[in-house]
Image: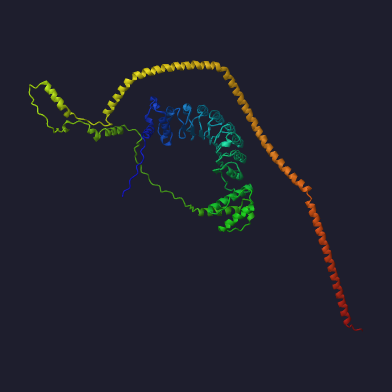
Amino acid sequence: MALREKKQPVDSLFAIGTNYVANNLSFYSTGENILEWLPPNIKNNLLRKITCTSYFSRNVNFTDFFKVLVNPSTEEINLTCMAVTDEMLNALHCCSNVRKIHLTVDGNSCTFTTKGLLNLFPNTPKLENLIIMKSKEVNDDVLQCISLHCPRLKGLSIGGCVNVTDKGLEFLSSMRISWLGISQTKITDKGIIKLVQGESGPILTEIIIDNCAQITNLGLNKITECCPNLKILNFQNCDTDILITSVFSCSKFNMKQIFWQIPLYYFAIPKNSGEQFYLFAVLSAWLLRKIGKEFENPHEYDDPNSTIEKIINEAKQLGMQIDFPANKLKQGVGDQVVNILDFLATAAINKQHLIFQKPKLPEEKEQETEVIDDESELNLDRVEEEMIAAYSDDSDEENIFRLDDIKPVKRDMQQIDLKGNVDEESWKLEIERVLPLLKVTIKNENRDWRSHLDLMKSYKQSINETLLPTKTQLEKLHKEIGSTLDKIENREKYLNRELDGVLENYRTLQDQLSKIKEKYKSVSTGVAERNRELNNLNGKVESIKQQMEERGSSMTDGTPLVNIKKAIAKIKSEITNMDVRIGVLQCLLLQTKLREEKQLEHEFENTSVPVF
């Protein structure tokens, strides 16, 4: 039983037309403004099509088409594959509703300047996402312009813009940005601290600061402190000591992704024993869980001896022979640490059934060059053939009236004698009787150009009939609108004259308010820093008070003296017992001595000694 082939979805007529225009863009002359009269939605669709890589290879002057296609309703501009110039940036001034702009400089193809960017952003008040990658024209002045004219900005990525410094981040500190990418820039800890202490700190969810050589542990610590909603943190190739305690403390913020790079010789060279041991314990726990063991993640303040004992026991159960003391692992570096991690990693790979094979290079085959017709190019001969085929099918042949094909109608017709003296009225009566039998109806189809022509004539007639009354009504409406606009203009001038003084006062008050806000911000930052110092000092004072109280209580407490007296009394009683034992022993010794003397005297008396 043959399976039915699934029918592929057919593109809509709108999509087919848009793709055709985009593929054959070089055939449309912008000088005649052919594309300028298109509706905004079609312009936006064409703009998305021709900015893709596959359409950029067409040999066209893209700048001219770009200026025609951009319009006030354009919301997204992606010029990643384009050679962007200041002329194109100036064309974007009409896009007041644009919400996303994406620019990536590839080599020397883009020639836009800082001036072009400074002129662009004052005309994009609704901009929400901005991505400008690898551009030397983006500097602190551009970031200041963005902070002043783009209040709705939520995401900013300026990776590879080497002229961005801490001053630019200070301008961004007053904005509410939710994700930020500043990799490969000259940003230091100072700029990071200014940014996260501003309005963006509590709402930041993603920060990418990889390959920033001047960011250290201080900046990362401040990020983890001031960004409670942070979900993604990337700080690869930064000048940090891994910051294990700070990074893993981010789990309380529901961190989803953390990217950092462990140096190749991290567990071979001693740096920070506490950090290295904690990372060793965490990696070992993770590998044991991958093997299938139920092993809890160690905490920073756990007893290292118990943690080491658990890891060694699990390694022994897996078959590892351990012939070194456990305290060798407490430093977090050395051959023993590397051997355990290597053994656990190998066991985890075997448990996951991962097999690493040698790569097999594909055999290179000679490619046969084939001439492929590009269906996207416009071929007039092909179009003419298709039109002839479309309008010369069998259905149109049915509409042709052929006298030879008419068959006689078999009906009983009254025969008439054709004589020379036939009356004219009888001829007319006969014609009226026969005429319905001679009528041939031709079936018209929708593709017949004759029906279209008749339809166009009827439309033209109806338009001409309705044109005059509509024109008079529109002229009357135009006059009424003109008079109303004049009244509104006069009223507006009157209100402007009346409100000039009030507006001046409002401007001065607004300037004063802005100055006061700046002073308040500067003072509030100083107050916050002093509050932090005060809290630190209060903590130190509390710890000193606690120590003093402990020492005072130990000085006034009589418990040690009572214990000493009890000990002395116990010693005296033991001395007395020892004296008694000594006296008893002396008595026993004396008795033994006397007994031995008596025995010697008795033996001496019994022994006879000869006298010479």
The quadrant in which residue 245 appears is top right
Q: Residue at x 31, y 33 (%)?
A: 383
Choose between 465 and 155: the one closer to the eye: 465
Residue 529, percent from left and from top: 66, 35
> Can residue 492 be seen?
yes
User: Does residue 286 lie above or below 486 as drawn?
Assistant: below
The C terminus lies in quadrant: bottom right
Choose between 177 and 88: the one closer to the eye: 177
Q: Residue at x 51, y 54 (%)?
A: 351
User: Does residue 475 lie above or below 238 as drawn?
Assistant: above
Residue 431, percent from left and from top: 14, 25
Residue 177, percent from left and from top: 55, 34
309 to the left or right of 473: right
Q: How many marks do you count on the picture?
A: 0
The quadrant in which residue 47 appears is top left
> Can residue 157 be seen?
no
Residue 451, percent from left and from top: 27, 28
Colouring scheme applied when the structure was drawn = rainbow
Seen as rendered, the residue at the extreme right is 612
5 to the left or right of 427: right
The quadrant in which residue 14 appears is top left
User: Does residue 597 lie above or below 408 as drawn?
Assistant: below
571 to the left or right of 39: right
User: Does residue 484 lie above or below 595 as drawn?
Assistant: above
